[in-house]
Amino acid sequence: MKNQDVVHAMKIVILDQSVALESDGFATPPRRLEALSGHTDAFQLDSFNRAVQRTNGGGKLTNLFKLKMLAKPAAAQMALGSDAYISAGPAGVVTPSGGSCQGSGAGTPGGSGASPRTPPAVAAAAAAAAAAQHTMSAEDLLTWSNEAIPTSLLKLAPEHASRAVKMHAHIQRYCGDDGREGRLPQSMAVEVVQKLLHQGLKRPELRDELYMQLVRQTRGNPLPASRARAWELFTLVAASMPPSKDFTGLISEYVHGVVRDGPAATSGGGAPAPGDEAVRTAAEATWAALKRSTKAGPRRTLPTSEEILAHLSSRRLSVLVFFLDETFEEIAYDITTTVLEAVEQVSSIIRLQAYSTFTLFVGYKPVVAQKAAVEGGPGDEQTLLDDNRYIADVVADLRSPKSAHEGWQARLLFKKRMFRETDEAVSEPQFINLSYIQAQHDYLAGNYPVVRDDAAQMAALQMQAEYGPALGGDPEAMMAGCERFITRQVFGTRPRDEWRADVGARYKALSEFSKEDARSQFLRILRTLPYGSSTFFTVRRIEDPIGLLPAKLVLGINKRGVHFFRPVPKEYLHSAELRDIMQFGSSSQAVFFKMRVAGVLHIFQFETKQGEDICMALQTHINDVMVKRYTKAKAQAEVAQAAPQQSANGSVATAAAATAAVGAVTSKFEGHIAELTQQLEDARRAAEENSAREGELRLAREQLVAELADAREALAAEGDARAELDRRLEAARCEAAEARRELESARTALSSAQATADETQSRVLNGRLEELTALVEARCREAEEANTRAAAAERALDESLKERDALEKKLKEQLESSQLDMRTALRARDDKVAALLEELGRAEEQSEALRCDLASHKADAAELEELRELRADVERKERQQAAIIEGQAKRLEELDK
């Protein structure tokens, strides 16, 4: 029996040394998950417990490890650190001591009931029997263990449960917890990651299981290498797919808790542990990736090995983004970059501030010029990309053979999503330049049919915008410009020499224009067209009640309505104003319009994959028009109520003076309105900054409250530890008393033995006496050390209580002060904004009233001028009649004589 105990103890020492060598004394403390209580029913605890009990009898090494962890004395377990020592949970699950698994250790009052002198093997067996009767909780399942799981953590179908077990094996293989020696090669590590991501992306029901397994692998993991690899894997999964809505709160609480409380996890309450900052950094990356994927959704394609390696090495990939003038910029992206972030990055590179109407498209360019006429190719088709789509998915689609077309190159395009009426108010040079490039591209593609005079003027403007006055009178350069800047369909309607002469004359007349002026004038001419500044979509006819539309046509949508064009030859067919469109909608393959034609409602249906983009463009223009009409009607109503009634008649001098005064006041008020508008924008910007600051303060308050709650929990834990020390001190005292009694009995036996026994028995008893004396002295020293630790713990508890009270008082004062300052600042900002708005309204009302007065005075002046002319005519006719009457009177007098 003694030999077996010795062998057992040697094995325990060997296993203790192996775990101690791998552990760094720090593990992510198993935090209490508040949201876990609402998900208990989702875990298959009964099946897991039954599976664990079935596996308890198998594996000698597993059972030995369980017995070792259960039989280890409390003092030996504490050697690994109060927050990081490994204890045995139920069914032999190895967890940190801070976990919720309450295994029954030998020699403790809550154990198997064995006394301190119970042999180790007997105590271990009793503890194992008690552990076998323990029922695991959800907290136990979500705590790290180096053993494989017998079934899935969540309730899944049998086929998915088997896949979940394989997924856990892959996770342990990647983290190095599968018992194999050596680090996994890079190629095999990438393969393992892709297998896990493939399961989560292909089978949504396994995503929550994958997230729960990653929480289990990272929560309380005491091995630094395994912990780092587990957080790498956690970040990759969070960047590729979000959890379901049911588990989003639980995952967010756990990851955000690690981000917030990483520096607070220490070994004994001192300086931060060595692996703390690394865990927090990895958790911050996971938190950022989780927020992005929750908003954008799962990846559409499996991340490639290149993306995974770049992410693991903190390196970003690059892709080219083209513009319509064939220039390009290179942007960087990672596994989580979205289209909206790429648009912001491009805008920052080209220094474009007003980029709200710009986005990315997928376009095609012929590899060789002759390939442009290849049948079945995509042509000038451009597909709008959703703002939340991942750039990595877009790049994967561009490189996919399914999207490849022979003779065509797929690429990313940066252009305007649509032209809006508010574009006219933007004066940023880069914005005007990009708008001009897109409008010129659409015009030269034949999307804007124009007459010959407009074509000549627009060609001259394009030459001025492209070359400036450098062409001069060079006839060859002028002809080349005509061929380049006039569409083929219009260019063939008159002789080449006439085009050159007409465009040359217009080009000379524009010599005083700068390039920016020419671009702006070009855009203004396009806006005057009924279908100007349109967004164009190629569709196929499905239903045409009036029978006038061709099988294939182009739709143009702008602020005026929907316009129909014949693609070949380019010809304008019909327009439907916005007020005539009663209803519209789309599906994945079609779009329909219910609109009025000649006073009769008809439903038109067209085949297209861009139905959602068509409806979005149409709805945007409708909203712009409605907002403009509402603003104008409201302003007119206010002016009508406030404007005084004035007389319709007046003198010319009064009208001229009023006209001059109105002009001066109008210019003054326009400048004042512009100034007030700028002040209003500044006030709004400041209000937004204050709102952001208030949000930051609220977040800081929540974090401080959470830290305070954690401090309270830590104090409670210290109290429990103090009680445990007191209990152990009392047990040590009892053992010392028992040892003293045994010593007295040994001395009595020695005295009797000296009288009756021989010399050999005396030596044995003397050795026994010395051992007992040493044991008593050791127990006394342990009792003194326990007293010292208890006193230190009590002092630390008192200091912690004082610090907590001071911190609560300070935080309360800071919070009240911040809230008071914020309320005062916000109230002042609101008052200022209200005053500015009121002043702006009054200024607009006065300006509108003056404009009305000016128009009235102009009408009165015109009417007065007409009356003057009429009066002069009447006077002239009266003079003529008087002269005639006078002549007739003279004749009568002569006749009378």
Image (tube, rainbow, N blue to C red):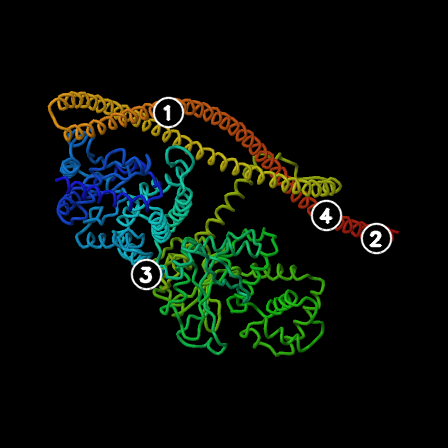
Per the image, label 4 sits on a secondary structure element best described as helix
Mark closer to the chain start, 2 or 1? 1
What whole-number distance in Å separates the C-alpha atoms at marks 2 and 3?
126 Å
Return the residue at label 4.
Answer: 865
Which mark lies nearer to you, 3 or 4? 3
Q: Quick one: label 3, few (<14), some, or many (20+) residues within 10 Å?
A: few
Return the residue at label 2.
Answer: 887
Which mark lies nearer to you, 4 or 1? 1
**Left or right of 746 on screen, residue 680:** right
* Viewer-side residue, 89 vs 370: 89
Identify which amino acid the numbered label 1 is placed on.
Ala
Return the residue at label 3.
Answer: 188
What whole-number distance in Å separates the C-alpha atoms at marks 4 and 1?
106 Å
* Viewer-side residue, 305 vs 650: 305
**Tag 4 and tag 1, C-beta contact below 8 Å:** no
**Tag 2 and tag 1, C-beta contact below 8 Å:** no
Question: Which mark is on residue 792?
Answer: 1
Q: Position of residue 24 (x, y in %)?
A: 36, 43
Per the image, label 3 sits on a secondary structure element best described as helix
What whole-number distance in Å separates the C-alpha atoms at marks 4 and 2?
33 Å
* Viewer-side residue, 158 vs 235: 235
Mark closer to the chain start, 3 or 4? 3
Identify which amino acid the numbered label 3 is placed on.
Met
- Where, by quadrant of the figure, is residue 677 drawn? top right
Residue occupying image coordinates x 52% and y 42%: 633
**Tag 4 and tag 2, C-beta contact below 8 Å:** no
Q: Quick one: label 4, few (<14), some, or many (20+) residues within 10 Å?
A: few
If the image is split into quadrants, where does the N terminus sit?
Answer: top left
What whole-number distance in Å separates the C-alpha atoms at marks 1 and 3?
51 Å
